[in-house]
Amino acid sequence: MAEKKPAERDALLGIGVKKAQDFVEWYSQVVLKAELADYAPVKGFMVIRPRGYAVWENIQAHFNQCIKALGVQNAYFPLLIPESFFRREAEHAQGFAPELAWIEKKEGEERVAIRPTSETIMYDSYAKWIRSYRDLPLRINQWCNVLRWEVSQTKIFLRTREFLWQEGHCVYESKEDCDREVQLMLEEYRKLCEDVLAIPVLTGYKSKAETFAGALYTTTLEALMPDGKALQLGTSHNLGQGFAKAFGIEFLGRDEEKHVPWQSSWGFSTRLIGALVMVHGDDKGLILPPRIASVKAVVVPIVFDKGREAVLAKARELAQALSKAGIACHLDDRDEYSAGWKFNEWELKGVPLRVEVGPKDVEKKQCVLVRRDTGEKAFVKETDLVQEAGRLLDAVQAGLLARAKKFRDENTVEAKSYADFQKAIEARKLVKAFFCEQEACEKKIKEETTATSRCIPFNQSGAGGKCVKCGSPAKRWAYFAKNY
Amino acid sequence: MAEKKPAERDALLGIGVKKAQDFVEWYSQVVLKAELADYAPVKGFMVIRPRGYAVWENIQAHFNQCIKALGVQNAYFPLLIPESFFRREAEHAQGFAPELAWIEKKEGEERVAIRPTSETIMYDSYAKWIRSYRDLPLRINQWCNVLRWEVSQTKIFLRTREFLWQEGHCVYESKEDCDREVQLMLEEYRKLCEDVLAIPVLTGYKSKAETFAGALYTTTLEALMPDGKALQLGTSHNLGQGFAKAFGIEFLGRDEEKHVPWQSSWGFSTRLIGALVMVHGDDKGLILPPRIASVKAVVVPIVFDKGREAVLAKARELAQALSKAGIACHLDDRDEYSAGWKFNEWELKGVPLRVEVGPKDVEKKQCVLVRRDTGEKAFVKETDLVQEAGRLLDAVQAGLLARAKKFRDENTVEAKSYADFQKAIEARKLVKAFFCEQEACEKKIKEETTATSRCIPFNQSGAGGKCVKCGSPAKRWAYFAKNY
């Protein structure tokens, strides 16, 4: 190839390690080099760069549409929470105390901390706003930053002291209404993860030890990462009536009597971006599922001195055809980089589909489509471009989900004995096992294997069995794994 | 009228004071009763309720579209800023020092404060990211919360310790590029304020005393509020090269030499919502300009026992017709409130257009349209509803802007002498006067009248004159007013 600057290829800073060889280093390099995020000057914080933030904006747009259709309204509550608020719900206070960042005292006011989550400050307002059953259900969500002063090792997107999230907080007349919508939101999360982000998830209840501080019960979504660790992608809690009692939320019922309502809360965070990187990325870098990618296809003209203008004109034409058909695309017609450099760059940055067009393609009225996930190339007639691009994007979307599902299924082990259990955890598998659900038993398992129960699936077939650890009767089985 | 519960009307908590009589109290009542925002448990903070946040979301959607078309990308930088960063740009440090909220020291790290604005933390990253002229212009914006620990009286939306805003931070090769885009962003702000929010603004430079801490110059948008005070709605700064030098931002130019780039920053905040309330609201409550209202029309059926179903069916039909035509509307078919109660409620909450339909209207195949701004009623044929509603919404949008412009023009005074100047300021007018632009002179004016220069318009006709205060030569005239 007599391209313009072939030597540049060598200079490209690609991913310097293999995903299979050094997963931790690979993850950091993909996040940094695909320009999703960067380290911040304060330890444990991150800068979300435009390419990472665009993913977050796309997640927000998708999810806002879902929740608004369900009657949820967005709002914004203060960043700072008074000390006394944390104390009102005892378990909640205990759960968050070690991670609070307090503000230096000012003007003799009560001590205040940066929100680690907003239950308390929101419910203080709810107590003022809710008067009667006519005000229920109240469904409010906020998109905001929260801060938890982690002391353990932090990792961009997965565990940082500050992160962005959404937290939904709803209030209902009855436990039944609350239960139903706890499940409804978990299902919205599942659809977001599987249908949009192409990340297969397990759903179920959390064990007592893993339940949110102050909740009656917690439901969760868990995904298996390529290193064999589970990652919690979102939770949806039934908070019971504890917070309502602590914050004095009451309503006049249909029976003209005062009642204490039921509450739910549910949240996911920018951690989802980390999950995307880990699950789909490969040795060339990031792979974005088409439904969450801002740029779904990149058009790269392959130019030589001869026929240069014709190729550039054709590339523009193809890019316009894609845009017009609603396939967001980017035309990379930069003069100072070679086509090879551009291929590497857009592979690194995860664009799901590449369209190449060179002088011969112009002649033959064709172009080349390259899938980011499999690297498969296909020659396509110009006139078929839009249809073929659409079909391939759907194939990439489905392919990524199928590949991740296959990985998870192949790395899931059913353990009948504790010896098998230990061996499987050691081999970094996701382990299914009967579990007595006792906190003491889970604590022992964690001490001995570092694994914890990730979720207790909703649909349990069969009559139960014996706890894999202690042998006592177990009604349900659970998934166990090491986790993030 | 034999409506269901006519007595309810008396129970409606409308605005208890006249806008003209007690503006301060009127403002608070509108904000609280229209459910835009609420007081927070920590002094000086606010809760932005769903109705207020929806306005903010609509502003965001509109503005994101504008800036993305200009090549600006959104990102997110950390909440906490190290102490040393503030010190790098001396004027900037001095400007914000009194308002910083520091976090209690942790783990022996440097002291950190909650961001009052993000120049310093963003430019630390920019220094890492910018290498060559190919990386420029760099245009990044973030939507976030900021905190400035105000000691003066706070007021919801107008001056709170925490507020939401957008801050754009751009980097350019040359002063010319920077100057041009400083103006470009100010023009985007002007369009947002005038064309969307229906708030007429004055644009111009800030005097030295009012320039942003660390900037070369500041351009501003100022609006006159009904109480005769000016409100700054947004600013767009040319930061010069000071921050770039302080943070080590350099780029390799087209000439292969190292250069220091030029920077701009620009921002507006949730204060815009306060301006909307003040400028447009009336004794009945909030008035939202149609282009920023989530609900543009409310359909209220007027039901009696007889013909009830026919009226409800017709109301549904009209609401569907409006929605289908892209006019977002709400059908208020609640059973437990009377039509009169509903009229008051939606007037209080600022919905720009009301559609009434009763039994006689059903018979006559008509409905009644009521403009929120003027209260004008019009009988409209069913078949003309969509067209008429669209026309009236345009009329409300234009009418609000015209009314605010008229108020401003009628309350602007040109002062030839300092005596006239003092009298006009005392009478709460916006005052045009020649001004020497000396800091000492502005300080005296402020001490004697509490007014400050609000802006020095870009287009100055004429040959200048003498400073209204000190009599020394003045090249330009400025607007002065008391301000928020």
Image (cartoon, coloured by chain):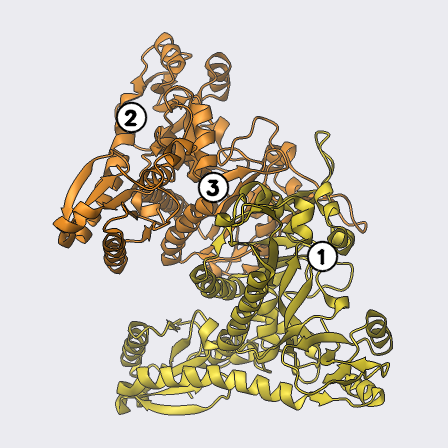
Chain colours: A orange, B yellow
Q: Are marks 1 and 2 on the same chain?
A: no
Determine whether A440 is above or below B369 in the image. above
Q: Are marks 1 and 3 on the same chain?
A: no
- In the image, A318 versus B273, the foreground residue is A318
Q: Position of residue A282 (x, y in %)?
A: 34, 30
Q: Is residue A239 visible?
A: yes
Chain where mark 3 sits: A
Are the residues flagged by discs 1 and 3 in contact, CB closer than 8 Å?
Answer: no
Which residue is disc 1 drawn over? B214
Are the residues flagged by discs 2 and 3 in contact, CB closer than 8 Å?
Answer: no
Kind of residue at badge 1: Gly
Element type at marker 3? loop
Q: Distance of mark 2 from mark 3, alpha carbons?
A: 23 Å
Q: Distance of mark 1 from mark 3, alpha carbons?
A: 33 Å
Q: Nearer the viewer, mark 1 or mark 3?
A: 1
Label 1 Cα crowd, 10 Å radius (few <14 / some 14-19 / many 20+): many
Residue at the location (21% across, 49% down)? A390
Label disc, if present, on residue A270 of the rendered structure = 3
B105 horizontally vs B440: left or right: left
Kind of residue at badge 3: Thr
**Quarter location, residue A413:** top left
Which residue is disc 2 drawn over? A407
Chain where mark 2 sits: A
Determine whether B179 is above or below B452 in the image. above
